[in-house]
Image (cartoon, helix red, strand yellow):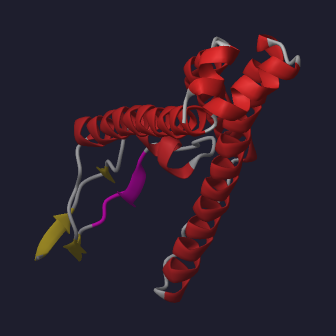
Amino acid sequence: MKKKLIIGGSIAIIIIGGYFAWQGIFNKKPSYTFVEAARGDVEEKVSVTGTVISDKQIDLEFENSGKIKKIEALVGGVGIMNIMLVSVSERTREIGLRKAVGADSKSILYQFLTESLVITVLGGTIGIVLGVANSLAVGLIARTQGLNWPLTISWLAVLAAFFVAMAIGLAFGIYPARKAARLNPIEALRRE
């Protein structure tokens, strides 16, 4: 929808976003939180297309995306736990045999925690690679459309995501690993 906007007076300013929203979107130190549309005694007609989004709406979108990230982490962790529980139940006889031969509970606990960690590290690495590739693709598409969006990849955020994936793998791998470590070797060997 096009509207004619008459800009007049000494200073006309269009507010784009709040300080924290602007900084969060473009991931760099903000020098201005607004765009100066006109200065001085100017009176001209400018055609405006688009929508002005309020600060509260932008802040709400960031808040909601944070909630979605927490839910995604929880779902991923539960998925890892389910995979590891299935692994423990399918390998019950193997665990019993290892314990009967002399493996202690600690080594079995570490084995399943390591497996959980490897699964999450691989998943986290794949997710990071896909995320970086997606960012590069969006930047490339934006440039073909004539937009000059700054493409910044925060390697600190990438590293943090990697360590969060590892922490989720360890946290949700504890229960299946403890379950495997507590198996009685005689009962484990009886199962089929």
26 to the left or right of 33 = right
Q: Is residue 68 left or right of residue 177?
A: left
Q: Residue at x 16, y 67 (%)?
A: 6
Answer whether residue 39 is magenta in the image.
Answer: yes
Q: Position of residue 187 (x, y in %)?
A: 59, 17
Name the one closer to the observer, 18 or 187.
187
Q: Which segment is the magenta one?
A: 34-42
Image height check: is 69 above or below 113? below
Q: Is residue 117 visible?
A: yes
Report the number of discs.
0
Is residue 178 in sight in this rendering? no
The percent position of residue 130, horizontal first and vertical second, equals 60, 64
What residue appears at the point 62 percent right and 71 percent down from the top-left corner? 136
The location of residue 115, given as percent across then percent down, is 72, 37
> Quadrant of the image for the N terminus?
bottom left
Q: Residue at x 52, y 88 (%)?
A: 144
Residue 112 shown in magenta: no
- In the rendered image, the vertical position of residue 185 relative to residue 150, given as above or below: above
The answer to whether residue 116 is above or below residue 167 is below
